[in-house]
């Protein structure tokens, strides 16, 4: 049963990145159930194949979104198998805590490679297919890109970058009739929340694993479906995120004041704590150091 009135997603051709689990998998299942044709890409073939079966044997491909040539090839193939694209949901991302001083720089490099460059490569590849009057790109940013917490610097920087890509793309493709939306989610009940930031270091700062408490995934998926149906500029979940967004500076000051204690201890823990990336990534060569 639809929870909203207005344009439906039935008949839309939707490409979803990061579709093996979490937001991507749940969104694919719901859009398929409501009549959309979905195509899936991600890094976990067994999980992708399972989601694809639940979506009427939807087309899917393994894809490292940090590899621009692979993204170009896979998006072209999936668009062809769907018979075109109406929507791309740039959802794939990773998260891992990082102490900016003394932490492992590879965490920052990997996070930016997936969350920023991967989104850029996805939009670059899918853009020609969605640049039509019914086209829509939805870019998954985060409340973390707006209000920044200790140990989340890599993730926050990446999600702020993703937001900037979305606003820029909106202006660049407006003349085609296509629209662009940016999603801002708080801490949802996904692996990204539990694995990426549900750590001993985070608990040392907050007294628990999250700032606002883990919100259920269902309302976020409903809100995302509404955004796709109506090609909305913005989607949030939980609802209160919409109240925070216009007051970013004030929200940051509140967070700064609230998190004065426990940060030094948390940084010491974070520098040695073995916190995994939310999804294991392909091994990429480290950038070569320039000679002095």
Image (spheres, grey):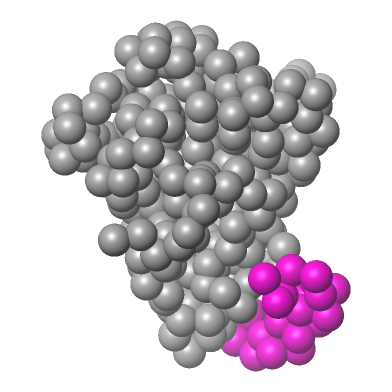
Q: Quadrant of the N terminus?
A: bottom left
70 in relation to 285, above or below: above
Residue 285 seen from this side: no
Q: Is residue 257 magenta?
A: yes
139 in relation to 266, above or below: above
Q: Quarter-wise, where is residue 35 in the image?
A: top left
Instruction: Depth check: give the residue in front, 244 or 152.
Output: 244
Q: Is residue 258 left or right of residue 272?
A: right
Q: Residue at x 51, y 53 (%)?
A: 6
Q: Which segment is the magenta one?
A: 242-265
88 in relation to 175, above or below: below
Q: Residue at x 65, y 45 (%)?
A: 181
Q: Is residue 207 magenta?
A: no
Number of marks: 0
Q: Main secondary structure of the magenta part?
A: helix
Estimate the x, y position of residue 290 in percent, counting from the top left: 74, 20
Q: Residue at x 50, y 38 (%)?
A: 89
Estimate the x, y position of residue 108 in percent, counting from the top left: 60, 45
Q: Quadrant of the C terminus?
A: top right
Residue 232 seen from this side: yes
Q: Residue at x 45, y 62 (%)?
A: 4
View extreme (front): residue = 6
Estimate the x, y position of residue 211 in percent, counting from the top left: 54, 80
Q: Is residue 70 left or right of residue 158?
A: left
Q: Is residue 203 left or right of residue 174?
A: left
Q: Quarter-wise, where is residue 184 in the image?
A: bottom right
Q: Quarter-wise, where is residue 176 in the image?
A: top right
């Amino acid at each position: 049963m639809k929870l909203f009135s207005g344009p439906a997603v039935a008949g839309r051709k939707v490409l979803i990145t990061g579709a093996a689990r979490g937001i991507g998998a749940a969104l694919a299942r719901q859009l398929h159930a409501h009549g959309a044709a979905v195509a899936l890409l991600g890094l976990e073939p067994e999980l992708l194949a399972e989601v694809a079966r639940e979506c009427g044997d939807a087309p899917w491909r393994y894809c490292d979104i940090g590899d621009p040539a692979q993204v170009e090839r896979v998006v072209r193939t999936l668009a062809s198998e769907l018979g075109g694209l109406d929507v791309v949901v740039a959802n794939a991302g990773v998260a891992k805590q990082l102490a900016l001083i003394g932490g492992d720089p590879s965490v920052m490099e990997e996070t930016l490679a997936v969350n920023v460059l991967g989104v850029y490569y996805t939009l670059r590849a899918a853009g020609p297919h969605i640049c039509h009057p019914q086209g829509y790109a939805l870019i998954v940013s985060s409340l973390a890109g707006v209000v920044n917490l200790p140990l989340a610097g890599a993730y926050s920087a990446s999600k702020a970058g993703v937001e900037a890509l979305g606003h820029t793309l909106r202006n660049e493709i407006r003349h085609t009739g296509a629209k662009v939306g940016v999603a801002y989610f708080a801490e949802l009940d996904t692996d990204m929340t539990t694995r990426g930031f549900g750590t001993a270091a985070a608990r040392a700062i907050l007294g628990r694993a999250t700032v606002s408490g883990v919100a259920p995934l269902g309302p976020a998926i409903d809100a995302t479906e509404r955004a796709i149906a109506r090609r909305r500029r913005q989607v949030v979940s939980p609802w209160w995120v919409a109240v925070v967004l216009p007051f970013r500076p004030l929200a940051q000051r509140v967070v700064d004041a609230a998190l004065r204690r426990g940060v030094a201890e948390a940084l010491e823990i974070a520098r040695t704590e073995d916190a995994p990336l939310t999804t294991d990534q392909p091994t990429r060569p480290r950038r070569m150091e320039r000679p002095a």
